[in-house]
Each structure stands twice: as structure tokens, then as C-alpha cells.
Image (tube, rainbow, N blue to C red):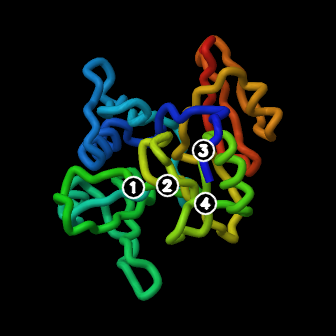
């Protein structure tokens, strides 16, 4: 199965924070990102699409992150030294550690013996869903990605094939519904927002005096931001 032309392109990862400076410092070290000299909460990567924005928000975290990051590290010492905590150890079913960053945001750590303790590497982004396969199909069309090939290690996943700054975009079914705004989202670039709405996306906020982009939601209500050439 080959790639198809993308409707939208990945631009950046965005993390909401109650303690913006601390969370930015944590993820800069955890993911080998360089704080922007003019804005240390804008974390710069080496390649296009690898930037991370850490945004201050007034609301506290009240629910499990519906979108989370999976990170590869050599061991947990570096993450723990930065202020992460272990929420769950590996067990008979799962080989990874469920962690929390200093702001309480869940992420997963995968131990890779060939890696150093830090910096870690962003391995995949995982989205909780009501209908994981439908979500994978929807985002697959937008990014022009194909489903995971053999051997399949995820429930419903898209292979990056160089179009995302990590290996997989994964969708997993969960019983609980979405109740609050996601604290992790991504930005996309698109020629026209109509290309998104005609496929089932919803406009949550139009550009205004404060923002130049559209705040959108996918068919399950997950927020993302869309930047057009006019943004």
C-alpha cells in the first residue's frame, strides 16, 4: 500500500501547562529540544515539524490525557531526575512504564537498552478513541498515511513514513468519553480549512484579533489547530 497525497501536513506538537516554564524545561530535556532564545517555552527541533509549543492555560488538569506521548529512553533515571513520576510499572500485558510529567500529564516510557538515559526520543503519539479504526482512517486520509504494516504491534496505527516527526500515530479504544479539552494537541498546515470541514472536522474558533489560525475538532471532538497560507 503506497502513500497518497496529504490533505494536511503536520506542523508542531502543543502541550497545555499549568506551570509553563517547568513543563517546557522538562520536555526540552526529555526530547532533546532547544528552547527558543526569544521564547523558552517554544522548543525547537532539528527538523521540520519537530517543534513543541508549551502553552500556559488557566484550567487545571482534571482528567486523564486523551492524547499522550510515548518516549524511548535508555532507563528511567533521567526522567525521574527531571521530575517525572512512575504511575504504573510494566506487567504481564504491557512492557512499558506509565509515567507523569511534572504537570501531571501522562506519557509512556519505553526502555531501549541501546539508548542513553537522556535525551529520549519521541516514538509515537497515542489517541484514546471511541472508534479507533474510524479515527485512524480519518487522520490517515488527512496526512496521506497508510495503516501499520506487519508485524502489527498496535490496535489501530498509522505509519509515519517520514511525514510525521515520530514513528506511529496510534489510536486505541477506551470506554470513557471525552469530557474536557485535550491538554495535548497538534497543529496542521492546510491549503484551505474547507478541505477539513468537508471531511467532517468542526471549526471551534475562527481567526480573530488574538489568533491567526483556526481551532478545529476532529470527528471525535479532539482539538487541533489549522494554519492556512493566510494564517
Q: Are marks 2 and 4 in contact (CB under 8 Å)?
A: no
Asked if residue 61 is positioned above or below residue 42 in the image, the reply reads below
In this figure, which residue is indicated by the disc labeled 1?
123
The reply to whether the C-beta atoms of the residues labelled 1 and 4 are less than 8 Å apart is no
Of discs 2 and 4, which sits in the foreground?
Answer: 2
State the residue at coordinates (52%, 53%): 159
Q: Where is residue 18 drawn, in percent x and y?
A: 43, 42
Q: On the image, numbered disc 3 is attached to which residue?
A: 3
Q: Pointer 3 and pointer 4: residues touching (CB < 8 Å)?
A: no
Q: Residue at x 62, y 63 (%)?
A: 156
Q: Nearer the viewer, mark 3 or mark 4?
A: 3
- Name the residue located 32 percent from the left edge and 30 percent from the top edge: 44
Q: Which residue is mark 4?
A: 171
Residue 147 visible from this viewpoint: yes
Q: Quadrant of the N terminus?
A: bottom right
Residue 75 position, x and y percent, is 21, 66
The Cα–Cα distance between marks 3 and 4, rounded to whole angstroms, is: 19 Å
Q: Position of residue 179 (x, y in %)?
A: 69, 55
- Residue 33 lies left or right of residue 199; in this view the side is left
| Cα–Cα span, label 2 and label 4 | 10 Å
- Residue holding disc 2: 168
Residue farthest to the front? 1
| Residues at marks 1 and 3, CA–CA distance in whole angstroms | 20 Å
Amino acid at each position: 500500500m503506497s502513500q497518497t497525497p496529504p490533505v494536511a501536513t503536520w506542523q508542531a506538537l502543543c502541550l497545555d501547562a499549568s506551570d509553563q516554564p517547568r513543563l517546557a524545561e522538562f520536555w526540552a530535556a526529555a526530547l532533546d529540544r532547544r528552547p527558543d532564545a526569544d521564547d523558552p517555552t517554544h522548543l525547537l527541533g532539528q527538523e521540520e515539524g519537530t517543534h513543541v509549543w508549551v502553552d500556559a492555560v488557566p484550567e487545571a488538569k482534571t482528567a486523564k490525557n486523551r492524547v499522550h506521548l510515548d518516549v524511548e529512553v535508555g532507563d528511567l533515571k533521567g526522567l525521574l531526575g527531571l521530575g517525572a513520576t512512575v504511575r504504573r510499572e510494566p506487567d504481564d500485558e504491557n512492557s512499558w512504564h506509565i509515567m507523569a510529567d511534572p504537570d501531571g500529564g501522562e506519557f509512556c516510557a519505553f526502555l531501549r537498552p541501546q539508548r542513553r538515559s537522556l535525551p529520549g526520543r519521541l516514538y509515537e503519539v497515542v489517541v484514546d478513541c471511541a472508534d479507533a479504526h474510524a479515527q485512524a482512517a480519518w487522520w490517515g486520509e488527512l496526512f496521506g498515511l497508510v495503516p501499520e504494516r506487519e508485524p502489527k504491534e498496535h490496535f489501530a496505527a498509522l505509519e509515519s513514513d517520514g511525514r510525521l516527526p515520530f514513528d506511529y500515530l496510534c489510536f486505541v479504544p477506551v470506554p470513557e468519553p471525552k469530557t474536557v479539552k485535550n491538554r495535548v494537541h497538534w497543529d496542521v498546515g492546510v491549503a484551505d480549512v474547507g478541505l477539513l470541514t468537508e471531511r467532517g472536522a468542526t471549526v471551534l474558533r475562527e481567526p480573530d484579533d488574538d489568533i491567526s489560525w483556526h481551532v478545529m475538532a476532529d470527528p471525535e471532538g479532539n482539538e487541533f489547530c489549522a494554519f492556512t497560507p493566510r494564517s
